[in-house]
Amino acid sequence: MTDADLPPAGPPDVDLNRVWIGVAGQVWRRRPGRLERSAAALLRSPGLARALLTTPSLLVPWLLASIAVLGVGAAATFSTGEPIVTMLAPAVAAAGIGYAYGPGIDPAWELSASMPISDRMVLLVRALVVFAVYAVLGLAASAASGIAAALTFGWLIPMTVVSGLALAAATVARSANVGVAAGLSGWTIMVLAWRAADGRFTAAITYTAPRATVYLVLAALCGITVLCAPRVRKGTS
């Protein structure tokens, strides 16, 4: 087939590629729902609201899986008397926080990297919302399992540390999977280390002033790491 056999390319003053990009944008455009519109009004940024509501660990399938895990832990705690929920809650939160930062996994990663808002601000908002959601889920599971109030709130500070560790690792390595692995590994090491030092399985989630101080210092170091990690270059190449 020669060039003469090809159909005409259109008027020379019309950029058909640009036209088709516009058509594709309208076809694949996702209309914001009521929750996204509310988040956009609260945050005063439609882009930030879209990035927040497309966080992988805030999507319905992920939340249902987390609820199922904590529900099983609550049932096991209720039947055995062992604080399974308080041991699971920081690990589940670490996985959720790790996937708040996910180049290659996060569908809104390119959006957050191209927004005029700092990528650290986007990451901070997403991490805080994920942490709040999983703290509420953990409290609900703890209340359903009927464990003691001391253990109910004893895991909130460890959850902060493990979440910070997962976020710091994901940010430095630029990999959500690395963040999740670091968070889960760190929590496992903390549980085993406190058990070896104290002799109790629940030592890592039992509140004491020295233990809380260690946790808060570690959380602060993780926060500094996140803030000082190399930032993503804005714009496209």
Image (cartoon, grey):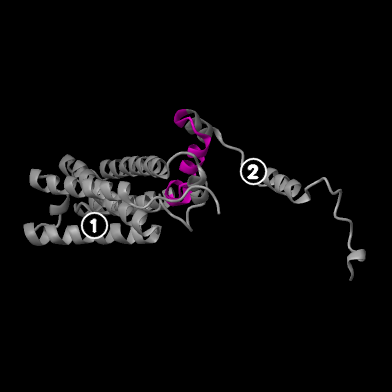
In this view, 43 is above or below 159:
above
Nearer-the-camera pick, 68 or 50: 50
- Residue 73 belongs to magenta span: no
Q: Pointers 1 and 2 in contact (CB under 8 A)? A: no
Quarter of the figure with the C terminus: bottom right
For residue 13, side relative to residue 110 (left or right): right
Query: Residue, x 21% and y 44% (percent of image)?
Result: 157
Furthest residue toward bottom: 1
Residue mark closest to the camera, 1 vs 2: 2
As helix, strand or loop, the secondary structure at mark 2 comes to: loop
- Residue at image mark 1: 187
- Residue at image mark 2: 29
Q: Amino acid at mark 2?
A: Arg
For residue 72, side relative to residue 104 (left or right): left
Q: Is residue 113 visible?
A: yes
Quarter of the figure with the N terminus: bottom right
Q: Amino acid at mark 1?
A: Trp
Nearer-the-camera pick, 70 or 174: 174
Magenta range:
42-62
Few, some or many residues within 10 Å of mark 2 (<14, 14–19, 20+) = few
Query: Residue, x 35% and y 50% (percent of image)?
Result: 97
Query: Residue, x 74% and y 49% (percent of image)?
Result: 20
Q: Residue 101 appears at what percent x and percent y?
A: 41, 51
Most common secondary structure along the magenta stretch? helix
As helix, strand or loop, the secondary structure at mark 1 comes to: helix
